[in-house]
Image: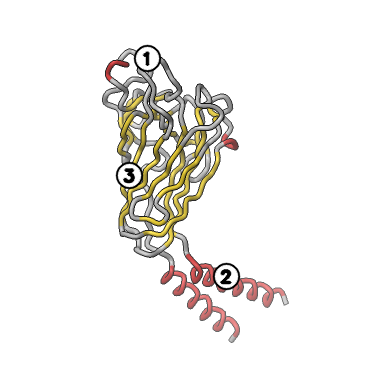
């Protein structure tokens, strides 16, 4: 009798959970493992420069055909491979990253994500660091924007740690929670560092660094209630079996 009641409550909790969790949505290539780099397909090598000025043809990292799968690049960025270690979207070793200051020019990466539920809450999770090879030090300047969302943007000032220290523990994990105002949103990570003169390395070559990006739905109040209900049922079942 008790088992039947328990199964009924768990079943109701599962139905409630399924009803209140927003539609699933996620970014494409959030660990930055896919693309065309100097090392070949899905291999940025040490790093691959994307959208470098053509006058910088002879600079290390220059690549006029490189791209990062799923991400549009404006300005100039560096797709980082073996130059330093980076977390993947699960926060574990093995990801690549993007320095949002390419050579002599700040840049941005963006991607449109579809399949969201209007009015529901989502969590944009990402890891951030700063390139310690040059100024501005100690902090970099980063703006994260999400179109068709509330709030529409948030600023961050990551402290420069990589590549002087490649420990994954020094990457800061950030959660940008927002409400979707449309079924599709555009996520953008943009450097706010000042652009300098070509050929002088004025500090815009060493910017905020992004890694391990993911987008997940938040269950909200009733989702948490359903999870709590299911958890309490399992605790009650264990206590009864131990009695």
Q: Position of residue 67 (x, y in %)?
A: 30, 32
Mark 3 and mark 2: span between their CA atoms?
Answer: 35 Å
Does 205 sit above or below residue 145? above
Q: Position of residue 141 (x, y in %)?
A: 47, 35
Sequence-earlier tag: 3 or 1 = 3
Nearest the camera: 225 or 184? 184
Nearest the camera: 47 or 102? 102
State the residue lying farthest toward the top. 58
Sequence-earlier tag: 1 or 2 = 1
Q: Nearer the viewer, mark 3 or mark 1?
A: 1
Asked if residue 226 lies left or right of residue 194, the reply is right
Disc number for residue 228: 2
Nearest the camera: 101 or 3? 101
Nearest the camera: 123 or 86? 123
Element on which disc 3 rests: strand
Element on which disc 2 rests: helix
**Which residue, given by chain and number where applicable, does mark 3 sit on?**
111
State the residue lying farthest toward the right. 243
Q: Position of residue 175 (x, y in %)?
A: 50, 50
Q: Local crowd at mark 3 within 10 Å, few (<14), some, or many (≥20)?
A: some
**Which residue, given by chain and number where applicable, does mark 1 sit on?**
199
Q: Quadrant of residue 5?
A: bottom right
Say which residue appears at 27% left-offset and 23% top-offset.
64
Asked if residue 141 lies left or right of residue 6, the reply is left
């Amino acid at each position: 009798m008790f088992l039947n009641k328990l199964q009924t409550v768990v079943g109701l909790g599962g139905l409630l959970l399924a009803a209140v969790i927003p539609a699933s949505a996620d970014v494409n290539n959030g660990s930055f493992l896919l693309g065309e780099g100097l090392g070949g397909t899905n291999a940025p090598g040490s790093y691959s420069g994307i959208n470098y000025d053509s006058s910088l043809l002879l600079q290390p990292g220059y690549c006029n055909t490189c791209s990062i799968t799923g991400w549009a690049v404006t300005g100039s960025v560096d797709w980082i491979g073996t130059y330093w270690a980076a977390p993947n979207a699960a926060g574990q070793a093995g990801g690549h990253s993007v320095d949002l200051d390419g050579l002599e020019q700040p840049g941005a990466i963006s991607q449109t994500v579809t399949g969201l539920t209007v009015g529901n809450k989502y969590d944009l999770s990402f890891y951030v660091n700063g390139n310690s090879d040059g100024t501005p030090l100690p902090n970099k300047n980063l703006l994260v924007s999400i179109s068709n969302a509330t709030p529409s943007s948030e600023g961050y000032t990551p402290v420069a740690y990589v590549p002087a220290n490649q420990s994954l523990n020094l990457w800061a994990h950030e959660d940008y929670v927002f409400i979707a105002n449309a079924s599709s949103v555009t996520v953008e990570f943009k450097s706010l560092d000042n652009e300098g003169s070509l050929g002088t390395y004025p500090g815009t070559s060493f910017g905020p660094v992004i890694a391990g990006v993911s987008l997940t739905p938040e269950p909200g109040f009733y989702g948490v209630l359903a999870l709590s209900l299911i958890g309490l049922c399992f605790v009650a079942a264990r206590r009864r079996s131990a009695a």
